[in-house]
Amino acid sequence: MAMMEKGRAIHSPLFTIRILDQKTAKATKVAAVAPQKVAKTAVKRNNTRRKIYQAIERLVPSLKKGFFIGIFAKSPALTAETAKIGDDLKDLFVKAKVLS
């Protein structure tokens, strides 16, 4: 809940990310959300979340420590390829200055 209230938001055509800086956290935590407003069926939401997590796997080692990151999918993310999702997330993380 604190991430939604105090975190900063960064937008792209595929995602909105919310970032909360937690200096005391030892690691960065990432959560992916595909809202029901975007995809009505659980199957589509779960597939979208899986694509997001798959794209994040290669970015996690280069993330700075001490952040909580929430990734909220928008409608175009449902049909996007994993490579496009990865590129979009990398651009967002660079904009947010969370990549080391």
Image (cartoon, helix red, strand yellow):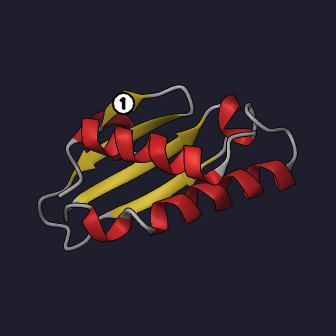
Is disc 1 placed on a helix, strand or loop? strand
Across the whole image, how many numbered discs are drawn on residues?
1
Residue 93, image x, y percentages: 32, 45
Query: Which of 61/84 is in front?
Result: 84
| Residue 74 picture quarter | top right
Relative side of 2 to 32, left or right: left
- Please state the horizontal and vertical placement of residue 34, each as a whole percent of the image: 66, 45
Towards the viewer: 44 or 40: 44
Query: Which of the 4 quarters of the picture holds residue 2?
Result: top left
Asked if residue 55 is positioned above or below residue 9 in the image, the reply reads: below
- Seen in the image, is 24 located left or right of residue 53? left
> Which residue appears farthest toward the left when viewing the image?
23
Quadrant of the rendered structure where residue 97 is? top left
Query: Which residue shows up at 42% across the image and 60% down it?
Result: 30
Percent x, y of residue 6: 27, 36
Q: Residue at x 57, y 65 (%)?
A: 54
In this rendering, position of residue 23 left or right of residue 95: left
**The C terminus lies in quadrant:** bottom left
Q: What residue type is labelled 1?
A: Ile
Q: Residue at x 36, y 39 (%)?
A: 91
Q: Determine which residue is flagged by label 1.
A: 10
